[in-house]
Amino acid sequence: MELFWAVIPVLLLIVLMAFLKMPGDKSSVISLVVTILIAFLAFHAKADTIFFSFLYGALKAISPILIIILMAIFSYNILLHTQKMEIIKQQFTSISSDKSVQVLLLTWGFGGLLEAMAGFGTAVAIPAAILISLGFKPIFSAVVSLIANSVATAFGAIGTPVLVLAKETNLNVLHLSANVVLQLSVLMFLIPLVLLFLTDPKIKSLPRNLFLALLVGGVSFVGQFVAARYMGAESPAIIGSILSIIVIVTYGKLTAKKDQEVTKSPKLKDVVNAWSIYLLILFLIILSSPLFPSLRHVLSTHLVTNIVLPINGHDTAYSIFWLTHAGVLLFIGTFVGGLIQGAKVKNIFAVLWRTFTLLRKTFVTVICLVALSTIMDKAGMIGVIAIALATATGALYPLFAPFIGCLGTFITGSDTSSNILFGKLQSTVAGHISVDPEWLAAANTVGATGGKIISPQSIAIATSACGQQGKEGEILKAAIPYALMYVVITGLLVYIFS
């Protein structure tokens, strides 16, 4: 009966969004209320535990997720206000007028780099918004951005998920990192192919799509594996994304010679000015990242907000490090970049306020979803689901290990949170079924990357970026087949080589 009650919030959320097509804000509110009732009546959680779990979840939703969503879309809106988005569009079309190249460059290349540097939704919001400005349909832009924001999330935000996994399981970070890349190897070729096929599904384009996917997947795999095996978790996604961008741009330029519709490339100073916002954001993120440990330590010890909540009889601390906060860095980069591009201070703040008002429903959705996952965790519901699956599968467990990671991300919206929830469980089960703990722990992260495709929080970010609030169910329904394919492939790889 515990298992029955534990799965109801997850199933309810899927039914409301995907099948009844209820808007995300209403679906999340209803699911949250049902989760609170189940936690109180079926799992006997105390009222104060539920209340403080809700507050803890709301805090996690506001910072960093909602602040980053707000600032990511704010940065895009400033580009619209200064009209520099027209130059960025011109630059993409000057590389190639081939829609497939543009989509792959924006979602897999640029989006992968954003995920590697900042994470927390920037890699969905910004590429999706730019795709729409290039003339792509909103739902298509949302779906391809979600699918692309999968593989890179394993090492997103400077390797945070794998670093946390190593800490939770006391396993070697280099071995874990290498295992993650190996388990993702096939998907590094398949995801680019899927993105290309969705953009251009014509049969005659298949040979070209296969060639480009093999090319991009090959450099991604080699770059990520070498970095993971010899450097650790911080750099694989960064190196893989940069190499992918170089290959895609080179391919676009070479094939564009035959294309008469390619626009003239804008001047270098205009390009630098147009990209100043994103260049400043990347510069600030790199500067405050673990790549510069001394500076990061200084920044992390100043302007810190610490909040302590009593949950389940223990003090649970939540800290916000403002000087290394991705949302704050996005704001600074956008504000300074906006001034460089000629925007007035009052107009910049006017754009920020307008962006805030447009995202009201997204705020409700994300706060309810993160609070829901926190209550499920603190009440023991997530643990019940995971242990039941491990018990039911027995020796076949490695086949289903990525599914547990996927479940963690679907509920929490975070690869890192999934590793905190289930990383230790995966390595413990490995010991009981004579499988390498490092291999099975890595499977949790790999499955979690697939869960990002259909995470309601990621979908809320995508709908906000594309101006499609209320169509979360439509996007979820479109994305589910790809997420299932993703997790099945990873499950087979983990099982065969375990």
Image (cartoon, grey):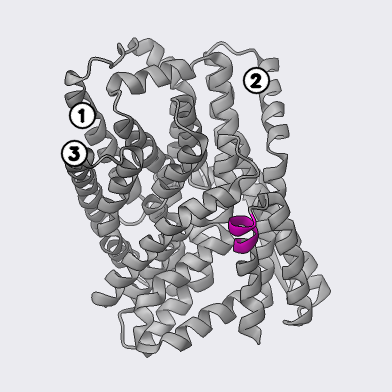
Name above or below for residue 210 compared with residue 55. Answer: above
Tell me the tag on residue 250. 1
Query: Is tag 1's residue or tag 3's residue first in the polypeptide sequence?
Result: 3
Q: Position of residue 117 (x, y in %)?
A: 43, 43
Q: CA distance from mark 2 to mark 3?
A: 43 Å
Q: Nearer the viewer, residue 180 or 303?
A: 180
Q: CA distance from mark 1 to mark 2?
A: 36 Å
Q: Residue at x 56, y 49 (%)?
A: 474
Work out whether 16 lies above or below 300: below
The residue that label 2 is drawn on is 348
In the shown orientation, is residue 339 left or right of residue 308?
A: left
* Percent x, y of residue 213: 23, 45
Q: Badges 2 and 3: C-beta atoms under 8 Å apart?
A: no
Which label is found at residue 182?
none
Q: What is the three-letter code of the residue carrying label 2?
A: Ile
Residue shown at the point (58%, 25%) measured from the top left: 77
Amino acid at pointer 3 = Arg
Residue 208 is labelled as 3
Could you tell me which quadrant the N terminus lies in? bottom right
- Looking at the picture, how far across and down is residue 133, in whole percent? 48, 25
For marks 2 and 3, the one nearer the N-term is 3
**Left or right placement of residue 400 versus residue 345 in this view:** left
Regarding residue 91, the answer to whether it shows in the image is yes
Judge the density around disc 1: few (<14), some (14-19), many (≥20) Cα neighbours within 10 Å.
Answer: some
Q: Which residues are magenta?
A: 14-20
